[in-house]
Structures are given as structure tokens and as C-alpha cells.
Amino acid sequence: MTSKAFETVITETSDSLAGPWRRPHQMLNAQVYDSHASIHDDATAQKLGFQGGTIEGPTHFSQFAPLCVSLWGNAWFETGCISAHYRNPSFEGEEVQAILAKPEPGERQCKIQMVKRDGTEVLRGTASVGQDASRTALDQRLTELKPLADPVILRDVKVGMKTKRQTVRMDFDQNMGDLYPFSLEDKLKVITESSPYYRKDVVSANPWGRPIIPIEMLSVLFQYRSREDRLPVRGPAVGLFADQEIRLMRGPLFAGEDYQTEREVVALSGSRRTESLWLRTTVFANDGLPVAKMLLNLASLKGSYAPYTQEHKQFYAWGA
């Protein structure tokens, strides 16, 4: 007999659904990025002006899953989409809450946000199901980007660049490498919203008959071999996820199954502190057809790239 996807307690009002307050776990303090520590390492983050090592953005996606399932049922696992702009980082020990604005009758998209106890907004965006939903939060954001002027870190990167396809896989006991130094089993021990659908010991309770990968771990799977892309990004520099969208097209995706990923540079943008590389990852099943896509804004902090000022002067001070 199929089990419920989640036992999460949901608070409902006339216009919203809200999950419980949760304290997500920081699992990336040992992450190594281009042979250096990342923004998730306390010392590195503090050096760059943050309170401490940040919790990776997609960790928060799990808290929205029960809310979306309560609206759309198992269609969420098959054609669900979360599209989010990360507004403020959260840190180990902080409580956060996922909130979903109820859609109008018949609509298949709604607004979402995550907040801290003091009201600080961690992320905002949209959640949806189906391939015919309205424009997502990041669809809209792509039309409003500030162009990247005088690039240094991304000077040699061009929109339209593509990577070769790579085979990726996530087994339960597989350490996911330097970028993600933990396994799916490790994550499931501390995931904010547990589900029998994620477990390998209760597949009889699963509508698909085999364990599915949680949406937050899809980000890990899709990024697993990203350091092999060899896009011409200057470094080392510390990067962070500034925007992210994960869309299932023929889901769910399963643990212990091979997939292929292919990435394309779809936009470049900038701010006072960052240079942003927007990558769209398309994920293919064994039949060669897409099963999921991810749009990721990887923002490199200018201040973390040691020769940034020197190279900027070299490239632009004399009209180079």
C-alpha cells in the first residue's frame, strides 16, 4: 500500500500554507572548490564579511516539498519546479520557515518565500507543476538582468558556450566528491522533511517502486561533475548560488540510476560585488530524452579573486 509522501505538519490560512520552523544542517563546511575552501567554510565566509559558513540554498527546497504535494499531489515529484532568488544567507542553528501563497483555482503556479524568525527573507520565487505553467521567477529575472560590464573573472566566458555530456549517478552510500563531501544516506539522516519515498527499505510504499532523489539533492547530482566542465573562468575565486531553478520534466529521478548532464551558458550579469555566470543544465535519461533542467546563477565574489584589481586595470584602464 502506498504511503503518504510526508507527515509534515502544515499550517493553513485562507491565502497561504506554511511549514514548521526548521533548523537545516550545514553539510558543506569541508567543501573544496578549486583547491580552496568555499563560502560554506566559517573562516572563508567570515573573511568575506559573512557571519559564518552559509547553508547552501537548495537545502531549503526540501521544506517546500510537503507544501507543494499538499496542493498538487504526486504530480509535484514528476513535473514540479522551484524557481528561487536567494535573498539572504542562513546559518547553522537558525530557524527558517517555508511559506507558499495559495494559487487561484485552476492555476498551476504560486509564489513562495522562506523567512527567518526575525522576518529576514532567505529566498523568494515561484513553485509550479506541469510544463505549461506561467513564467517562473527566474524566467522573469533573466529579462531584468544588469549586464556584466568590464568582466575580469568571466572575461573569457561567452553566452552560448556548451559543455560535453557527462554521466552522473547518486548511490545511497556514494560520497559526492570535493564539492559535496557527503552521501545521500548522510543527507537523509538530517534532511528537514523526511519521506518514505526517499528510502530504500520501504519501496513497497513508494508509487514508483524505487527510491527517489529529494529535490535538494538533485542540485548535488546535477553539479557532481561540474568542475570538469573547464569553462574559462578565472580563479581561484569564491562563488555562491544567487539564483536557482530546478524543473522536473519526466520525474522523479531515482537513486542508483545513470543520467547525463549538459551545460550551457545562457547569460552573464554583474553587481558591485559579483560577476555572475548563468548556466542551464539539461539532464537526460538513458533514452536520450530530457528528464529535468536546472538554471543556476553562480556568482563569483570579486573580492575573493586575488588579482582582480590588477587585472581590471590591465584590461580596462587603457582601453584594453
Image: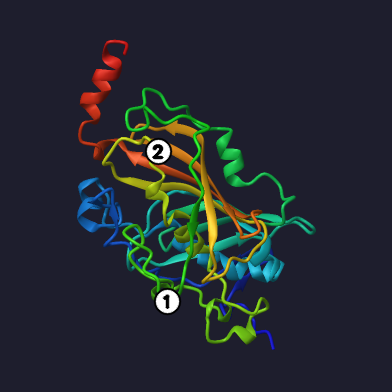
Q: Residue at x 29, y 35 (%)?
A: 302
Dot 1, how many residues are within 10 Å of its Cα: few (below 14), some (14-19), or many (20+)?
some
Dot 2, how many residues are within 10 Å of its Cα: few (below 14), some (14-19), or many (20+)?
some
Please say if 203 is above or below 123.
below
Q: Which residue is mark 2?
A: 231
Can see residue 115?
A: no
- Residue 298 is left or right of residue 238, and the answer is right
List x then y, in percent, for residue 87.
44, 48
Q: Which residue is mark 1?
A: 185
- Residue 79 is left or right of residue 301, and the answer is right
Q: Residue at x 30, y 56 (%)?
A: 40
List x then y, in percent, for residue 97.
49, 65
- Give the structural element (helix, strand or loop) at label 2: loop
Residue lying furthest bottom in this view? 1
Quadrant where the C terminus sits is top left
Task: Place residue 23 in its image quadrant.
Answer: bottom left
Q: Are marks 2 and 1 in contact (CB under 8 Å)?
A: no
- Residue 286 is left or right of residue 61, and the answer is right
Q: Amino acid at mark 2?
A: Leu
Quadrant where the N terminus sits is bottom right
- Residue 55 is left or right of residue 46, and the answer is right
Colour scheme employed for the rendering of this structure: rainbow
List x then y, in percent, for residue 254.
57, 69
Q: Amino acid at mark 1?
A: Glu
Task: Place residue 73 in its image quadrant.
Answer: bottom right
Mark 2 and mark 1 lie on one chain; the one further toward the N terminus is: 1
CA distance for labels 2 and 1: 31 Å
Q: Residue at x 38, y 64 (%)?
A: 176
